[in-house]
């Protein structure tokens, strides 16, 4: 009698889709979590890219004497908070250090202003599956100095 039940159980295919779903679910969840994190990372990168472009354009228009003084301070505030005086909230939650925005000047035939920033990005979901919890975006923009 026991062998008859085992034979019927071996021939039964009613639970096949459930087993396939149980095997495919972890992969589907991994793809979903990865897609969400990739979207968050791209959104943060594009925000940093835009603010660095604005800060570099601002700094390219200040007088040359102010490049390393108040002009650079204002450009750093513009990059981090979106305001020249730094009164706004941080645009990227893990990017709070003004010193991460570095000025480089080239005095070849034309003075060029280059701002570079290294911005940390914190993953929220990927550490759950054992992947790194942080990566760093490096964004650089360069403009010709026209000083108004």
Image (cartoon, rainbow, N blue to C red):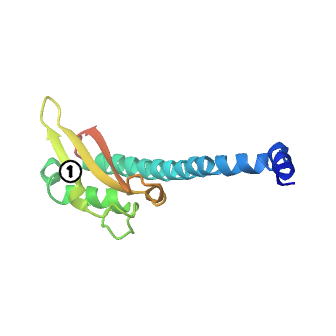
Q: Position of residue 117 (x, y in %)?
A: 27, 50
Q: What residue appears at the point 27 percent right and 55 percent down from the top-left corner?
A: 75
Whether 127 is drawn above or below 8: the answer is below
Q: Position of residue 8 (x, y in %)?
A: 86, 47
Quarter of the picture containing the N terminus is bottom right
Side of 83 where 36 appears, left or right: right
Side of 30 where 112 appears, left or right: left
Query: Which residue occupies the extreme top position in the image?
Result: 109
Whether 73 is drawn above or below 28: the answer is below
Q: What residue appears at the point 47 percent right and 59 percent down from the top-left corner?
A: 128
Front-most of residues 14 and 71? 14
Q: Position of residue 141 (x, y in %)?
A: 30, 41
Side of 127 where 68 appears, left or right: left
Q: Which residue is mark 1?
A: 102
Query: Which residue occupies the extreme front position in the image?
Result: 1
Q: Is residue 105 visible?
A: yes
Q: Position of residue 90 (x, y in %)?
A: 38, 65
Front-most of residues 70 and 38? 38
Front-most of residues 50 and 126? 126
Q: Element at badge 1?
A: strand
């Amino acid at each position: 009698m026991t062998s008859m039940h085992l034979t019927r159980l071996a021939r039964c295919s009613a639970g096949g889709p459930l087993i396939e779903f149980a095997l495919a679910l972890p992969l589907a969840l991994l793809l979903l979590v990865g897609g969400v994190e990739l979207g968050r990372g791209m959104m943060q990168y594009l925000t940093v890219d835009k603010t660095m472009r604005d800060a570099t354009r601002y700094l390219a228009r200040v007088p040359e004497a102010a490049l390393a003084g108040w002009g650079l301070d204002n450009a750093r505030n513009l990059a981090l908070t979106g305001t020249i005086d730094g009164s706004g909230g941080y645009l990227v939650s893990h990017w709070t250090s003004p010193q991460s925005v570095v000025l480089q000047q080239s005095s070849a035939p034309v003075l060029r202003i280059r701002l570079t920033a290294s911005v940390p990005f914190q993953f929220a979901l990927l550490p759950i599956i054992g992947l790194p919890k942080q990566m760093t975006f490096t964004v650089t923009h360069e403009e010709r100095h026209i000083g108004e």
